[in-house]
Image: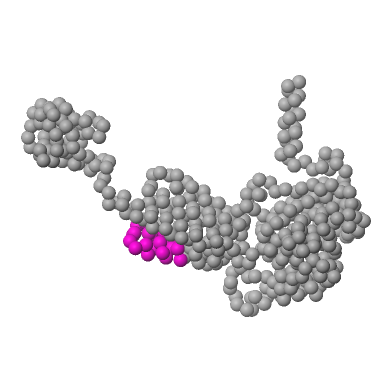
Amino acid sequence: MRALMLLLGALGLAQSLGGVDPVARGVPAESVLVAQVDGPITSVVADHVGEGVRRAESNDYAAFLVELDTPGGLDVSMRDIVQAFLGAEVPVIVYVTPSGARAASAGALITLSAHVAAMAPGTTIGAATPVRLDGEGGGEVERKVIEDAAAFAVSVAQQRGRNVDFAEDMVREGRAVPAPEAVELSAVDLLAADRAELLRAIDGDTVVLASGAETVLRTANASAVDHEMGMFTKLRQLLANPTLAFLLISLGGLALIFELANPGASVGGVIGVVMLALGFVSLAVLPVQVAGVLLVVLALALFAAELFTPGIGAFAGGGAIALAAAGLMLFEGPFEVEPMVLWPTVVVVAAGTVLAGRLALRARRAAPITGDTGMIGQHTVVDEAEGHSGRAQVEGAWWNLRGHDQPLHAGQRVRVVEVDGLTLIVEAVAQEEK
């Protein structure tokens, strides 16, 4: 009986960890897989949504519903999502929600690409003019980017039977409209106050899948199944935050600076390496400019230089300027470092570097306290003596003594003047020095 209970418990744990779908557990097929997208569109979001489409297809869900609230994001990630939606063999629904949410920039094109596009009252859609991330090329390059984005938006709108003029205007003119106007313009299909109202409203509608097959939506009584991110995916998405990335790189660099100023403790070094590694993972997920990355490297180099040439803090000041410029230039579009975090972080890192430089300078100027050099000048009292030889305890250890120019006697106070192997050469301490 114990073995059976353990087996059942293990199977239950494996099922919960494995994310077994309701269809596989015997739940009616009228289930809708629901994914939440709240924040910028990144490669992590694209992978998560693409996985949701594949999961909905393979498990015969009635539809795949994406509840969207985004300021936009990466063009390449947006195109990956749009391609997944246009090639889906399961009905895809995009619902801009809750009230106050938006489907801006990349989010607008994602919404247009769904089989069914819906919005909650108080939401907006549009403003899809692309932003170049490299800052190069001038007006000609910008024009080509906009032409390409406009053509893509028109193509998506045509394929889904939506308002082509609005799709083009939101790219070329940055046009954005509230939910009721979006319905009037046929940019989206309907307004819905909540998820339940949406699923009831579209029940019985017919959509055409990528293969050309038509399917009728059966969603009125459908149960919702959450498509959640795995732990590693959540970590990657958490790190896809420009403010967090800037903090990790800045504070990680400061931790390494303190390790260099006081080598041997290792704690600062370990913390710094971990924080920098996580920061660079963030940079791998987010769109960055080369100039911003170079400024980060320059800032860290100047902070390190402060350790070796501490003075009035010139290198730390230069590093602070470079770090502030990096925070302003590192990310583009909807990705930016929060000013309320940027400036205090720059001040803290610069001040910490100046302090580390002072500590390093003090350590270099301090008298040695270990090794042969550290023994010279130490005072002790002779414990045993015979002629010029004797023994005494110095720094908690017993040493052989040899008088420098006169015999020794027990109880005599002496000072170390030289170290000869394991023997200390000593001389008597004058009465006034005692």
Q: Position of residue 22 (x, y in %)?
A: 82, 42
Which residue lies most toward the left here? 406
Residue 35 in view: yes
- Which colouring convention does the figure follow? one colour
**Quadrant (top left/top right/bottom left/bottom right) for the C terminus:** top left
Q: Which residues are magenta?
A: 296-321
State whether residue 149 appears in this view: no
- Image: 356 above or below 169: above
Q: Residue at x 33, y 61 (%)?
A: 311
- Residue 138, percent from left and from top: 60, 77
Find residue 167 and report its image quarter: bottom right
- Whether 28 is drawn above or below 121: the answer is above
Q: Is residue 299 magenta?
A: yes
Image location of residue 181, percent across then percent down: 81, 70
Q: Is residue 410 left or right of residue 34?
A: left
Which quadrant of the figure contains the N terminus?
top right
Whether 228 is drawn above or below 148: the answer is above
Query: Residue 164, percent across and down?
Result: 81, 72
Residue drawn 80% across the image and 50% down it: 33
Residue drawn at 15 percent across, 30 percent down = 382
Given the current orientation, which residue lies at the most extreme top position?
A: 1
- The residue under the point 25% across, 34% down is 395
Numbered disc total: 0
Query: In the image, is residue 178 part of the stretch drawn in magenta?
Result: no
Q: Is residue 260 left or right of residue 41?
A: left
Prevailing secondary structure class for the magenta stretch in the rendered image: helix
| Position of 157 relative to 200 (above/below) | below
